[in-house]
Image (spheres, rainbow, N blue to C red):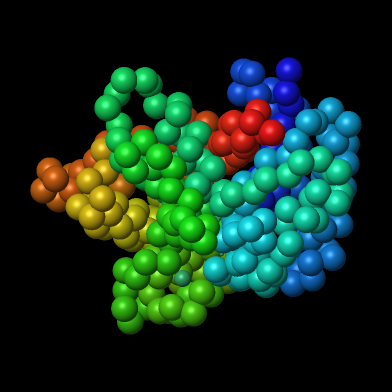
Amino acid sequence: MSVCLAVDIGGTKIAAALVDCATNQIIDRHQIATPQSQQPAVFSAALVSLLTPFIANADFVAIASTGIINNGILTALNPANLGGLNRFELVDDIQRITKLPTYAMNDAQAAAWYEFISLTPNNNTHNMLFITISTGIGGGLVLNQQLQTGARGISGHIGHTVVDANGPVCGCGRQGCIEKVASGTAIGELGSALFKRPCNGQQVYQLALDGNEDAISIIHSSAAAVAELIANLTISLDLDAVVIGGSVGLAPHYCEYIQQYLNEKPELYRPRIIPAQAGGDAGLLGAAHWFARQESHT
Ligand code: BMX
Ligand code: ZN
């Protein structure tokens, strides 16, 4: 039995789990808050404490990480999502910590792969997009049933497509990216400005669930922007299905709001909308499955 130490590095939390590769089941799981520091050494120290208890029981490491992953190096497209950290030698560092074969890919690409293979077989899904609406907005594309990682690891970074040319400047340097106006971080920023007190995305979402009209309109603008993005990508890529994940994407009613905005569009712009079946574990399970195939060939 091959056991994978899967690691999911997000802007808010880092999760690690042992995954049984034969059954795709999580055996043991633990998570910590993502360090808010520009220093690679601080990031590395957090990984040491999280991963050390798992090492003895693992055969290899599969990482799903926020950021562009190219040749094992993490480059933040939006460093603000990672406490300002913008470059980290991810694979080398984790290999040094664990002494195990180590592989890495982008978090949303990994989740897209797991959600794609979890769709019921024979359902004729050829082109699928996974969108995570969380700290940032990430994406993973499966075209012709093949996961697209891109020659430079960039494929699927839909959070940095522009929805408001006059909008605020995103951490990536572009103006009006959807991530800057509709992500969990953006929801928190919009709420903080409106309520004149610091609040995070979760607090604004809770206010909306409690019936606060201003908070409801922030959540609706986010879902409407995501629906526009889905319609644009559907007509560009002939998408059959769009899977929604992330802490905002899976929050109560959010998928229904997306569906509501899509329903206002002509039929060609409306793919199937599916909430992520693996919930918050799609990144862990996707990286484990993707790299188990590679590991079995070595
Ligand atoms: C950002 C970008 C993507 C990532 C997405 C979701 C960085 C550090 N990350 O657009 O690579 O997939 O956020 O990330 O530039 P999450 O942290 O919200 O899961
Ligand atoms: Zn951007």
**Please, is residue 186 above or below residue 2 in the view?**
below
Q: Is residue 203 visible?
A: no
Residue drawn at the location 68% of the way across and 45% of the way down = 103
User: Residue 263 vs residue 143: left or right?
Assistant: left
Q: Residue furthest front?
A: 298
Foreground residue among 85 and 197: 85
Asked which quadrant contains residue 218, the reply is bottom left
Residue drawn at the location 29% of the way across and 23% of the way down = 123
Foreground residue among 171 and 91: 91
The percent coordinates of residue 78 (x first, y second) are 56, 69
Foreground residue among 54 and 13: 54
Q: Residue furthest left?
A: 266
Residue drawn at the location 69% of the way across and 28% of the way down = 19
User: Residue 197 vs residue 26: left or right?
Assistant: left
Q: Is residue 102 visible?
A: yes
**Please, is residue 285 above or below residue 34 in the view?**
above
Where is the N terminus found, in terms of image quarters? top right
Asked which quadrant contains residue 43, the reply is bottom right
The percent coordinates of residue 16 (x first, y second) are 73, 40
Foreground residue among 202 and 208: 202
User: Residue 240 vs residue 297: left or right?
Assistant: left
**Please, is residue 123 above or below residue 136 in the view?**
above
The percent coordinates of residue 174 (x first, y second) are 43, 78
Where is the C terminus found, in terms of image quarters? top right
Residue drawn at the location 61% of the way across and 70% of the way down = 79
